[in-house]
Image: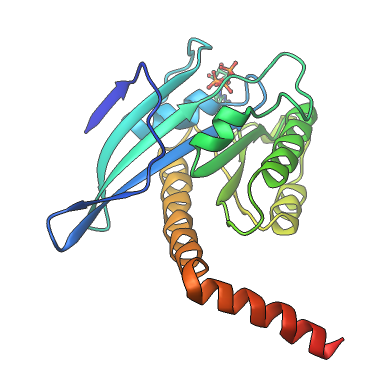
Amino acid sequence: MVVQICTSHHPNSKMSEIGHQQQKVEANILVLGAENVGKSALTVRFLTRRFIGEYVGTESIYTHNVNVDGRETLFSIWDSVCPQNPNLNNCVTEEQLRWADGFILVYSICDRDSFNVVRQQLQRIHQMKKRHCTVPVIIVGNKRDLQHRREIPSEEGRLLAISSDCDFFETSAAETYHGSLVVFHQLLESLRESRNSNKKNTGIKGIVRSMSAVFGRRRTE
Ligand SMILES: Nc1nc2c(ncn2[C@@H]2O[C@H](COP(=O)(O)OP(=O)(O)OP(=O)(O)O)[C@@H](O)[C@H]2O)c(=O)[nH]1
């Protein structure tokens, strides 16, 4: 396993050929969310299987080579830092949006404000990403071990995810490794699906498909 902090951002990643048969999968994943929700804890859990109680609150990009379902996969994970007063214009930067192939939006189940930050970040992602591209997003309610301090019912998180066409998980980075593993692997799976469907929708076939969608719809109006 390679875990390393990069000093520069990766260029836009996609898929690269290794040999004739297998493709190496590359995934740029941006971890977003308010301060103190466990973004670093979740990321470091996935990378090292460990929970380290305190993290330096700096922005980092980690690279992680791992075999997933028999395919070599290079994760680049950008553990972001939320601005002090997040608003729709600064909660996700254009650089981040350009860089990322997929997003993990983390809130703490004990912090209503952090849930509102996730809403804003979600809105910003949907606003900025091109409409014809499907971008995988996972919403994560972290700190599930702190049930007695819960402010966001699971249903509310799930509802936000359903209404935004995202996946949803609740985790406790403090308690288990498995939760973080499932989150990152699910995002990878969604990324593969969205790349396949984006590929199908480009080129001449995509144009024909879009035109028939438009004209088909008109005929029924
Ligand atoms: N009880 C509990 N505490 C957690 C969990 N995840 C993280 N923490 C704690 O929450 C605090 C913040 O965790 P971080 O991972 O630094 O959160 P962050 O979102 O990266 O914070 P910033 O770097 O400030 O943006 C730390 O004290 C962690 O030990 C969890 O699942 N349960």
Rendered-image quadrant of the N terminus = top left
- Where residue 46 sits in the image (x, y, percent)? 39, 35
- Is residue 36 left or right of 117 when viewed as pictured? left
Give residue 116's position: percent from left, percent from top. 79, 34
Between 217 and 181, which is closer to the camera in this rendering? 217
Q: Residue furthest bottom?
A: 219
What residue appears at the point 45 percent right and 40 percent down from the top-left corner? 180
Q: Residue at x 27, y 58 (%)?
A: 69
Determine the quadrant in which ligand 1 lies. Answer: top right
- Determine which quarter of the picture holds residue 117: top right
Residue at 58% over, 19% down = 81
In the picture, measured across the screen, residue 131 lies left or right of residue 163, that is: left
**Eyeballing the image, is 44 above or below 135?**
above
Please state, as top left, top right, bottom left or bottom right, where the C terminus lies in the image.
bottom right
Q: Is residue 97 left or right of residue 110?
A: left
Classify 194 as above or below 61: below
Q: How is the image coloured?
A: rainbow
Q: Residue at x 50, y 17 (%)?
A: 59
